[in-house]
Image (cartoon, rainbow, N blue to C red):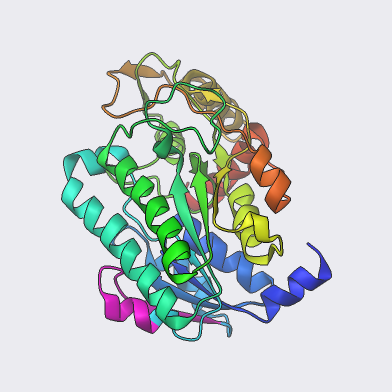
């Protein structure tokens, strides 16, 4: 990162919503390493207090326990803030199918509250977690930002509505926004527990317990798995970019390669077996396909490379090796 960009980060106050979550806590750490003043907001609906332990010891970090569904909490968190990295949301396609109302309340109502609070506080730039689920039933590969299909789940609808609101707030109130369509993010601190745990940490924990992971479908579905450090890079580039053409856009946040679930499981077994050879003997099972699942996901990251100078460093193999080591060291 250039000297002037580092100076910008060190002289800025950044609000991270969802700060106790997987992505949010990693973003907070990265910003503090760049000497930013960081405010974290979370209500612990899906985040964990343990993710804040090290952050709370840092002199440049302030935590606010609050809910984005409460406009007063949003106003409090945005006071004196230069940039916002909005990560707070209820993730998971299955969760949204089981409870569409709460997903909408948080992901749409809460998002609108944050936009209003950002506008009222005079925030310079509002950067938010969008989603690859927005591509819906579009079968085109790779996914290019301006070609989407119909959403396949309530969750996907909420994330598309976020993009519409962000665009409208630029047109109506001149609030600069940047949307980052995350593609299957994984890495350190991602929660392996709970009914809606992401596939990689869930499978890792099952392998470590010698339990058979269950693949939904025949394993041919593929994803553009994206390591957390690539996502951190995108968020920081979205803050420091001085390219006016880069603003008020949405970007795929991915590596640009796809991996089938069968290939993923093979890699996980291989890397975990380096720590415990018994894991290589654990059987993998197949189950029914999940409602709302997109068969294949592969991102074009050309737009991000061109406008934000995005340069992802971690492919699936290097990212998985880092993630597996973290889980083994921290959760075994």
Residue 190, x across and y down, in percent = 46, 50
Q: Is residue 266 left or right of residue 163?
A: right
Q: Is residue 144 left or right of residue 286?
A: right
In this rendering, the count of numbered labels is: 0
Residue 215, x across and y down, in percent = 37, 22
Q: Is residue 67 inside the magenta stretch?
A: yes
**Quarter occupied by the N terminus:** bottom right
Q: Is residue 126 left or right of residue 44?
A: right
246 in relation to 65, above or below: above
Depth check, front residue: 163 or 231: 163
Which quadrant of the figure has residue 241? bottom right
| Residue that appears at 40% across and 39% down | 134
Residue 186, x across and y down, in percent = 51, 43
Depth check, front residue: 279 or 85: 85
| Residue that appears at 46% across and 39% down | 132
Residue 307, x across and y down, in percent = 69, 50
| Residue that appears at 24% across and 43% down | 96
The outermost residue toward the right is 3
Q: Which residues are magenta?
A: 61-76
Mark yes or no: residue 42 visible: no
306 in relation to 28, above or below: above
Mark yes or no: residue 249 visible: yes
Q: Is residue 320 inside the magenta stretch?
A: no
């Amino acid at each position: 990162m250039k000297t002037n960009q580092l100076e910008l980060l060190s002289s800025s106050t950044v609000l991270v919503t969802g700060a106790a979550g997987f992505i949010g806590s990693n973003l907070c750490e990265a910003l503090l390493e760049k000497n930013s003043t960081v405010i974290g907001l979370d209500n612990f609906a899906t985040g964990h207090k343990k993710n804040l332990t090290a952050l709370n010891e840092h002199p440049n970090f302030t935590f606010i326990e609050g809910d984005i569904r409460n406009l007063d909490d949003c106003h409090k968190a945005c006071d004196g803030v230069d940039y916002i990295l909005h990560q707070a949301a209820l993730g998971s396609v299955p969760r949204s199918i089981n409870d569409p109302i709460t997903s909408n309340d948080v992901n749409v109502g809460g998002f609108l509250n944050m936009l209003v609070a950002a506008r009222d506080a005079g925030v310079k730039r509002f950067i938010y977690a969008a989603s690859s689920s927005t591509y819906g039933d579009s079968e085109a590969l790779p996914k290019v930002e301006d070609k989407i299909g119909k959403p396949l789940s309530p969750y996907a609808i909420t994330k598309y509505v976020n993009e519409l609101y962000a665009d409208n707030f630029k047109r109506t109130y001149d609030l600069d926004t940047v949307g980052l369509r995350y593609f299957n993010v994984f890495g350190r601190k991602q929660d392996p527990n709970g009914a809606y745990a992401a596939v990689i940490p869930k499978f890792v924990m099952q392998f470590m317990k010698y339990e058979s992971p269950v693949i939904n479908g025949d394993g041919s579905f593929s994803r553009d798995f994206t390591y957390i450090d690539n996502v951190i890079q995108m968020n920081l580039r979205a803050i420091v970019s001085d390219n006016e053409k880069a603003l008020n856009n949405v970007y795929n946040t991915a590596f640009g390669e796809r991996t089938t679930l069968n290939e993923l499981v093979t890699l996980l077994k291989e890397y975990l077996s380096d720590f415990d050879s018994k894991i290589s003997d654990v059987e993998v099972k197949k189950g029914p396909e999940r409602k709302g699942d997109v068969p294949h996901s592969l991102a074009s990251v050309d737009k991000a490379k061109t406008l934000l100078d995005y340069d992802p460093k971690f492919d699936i193999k290097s990212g998985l090796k880092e993630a597996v080591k973290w889980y083994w060291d921290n959760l075994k």
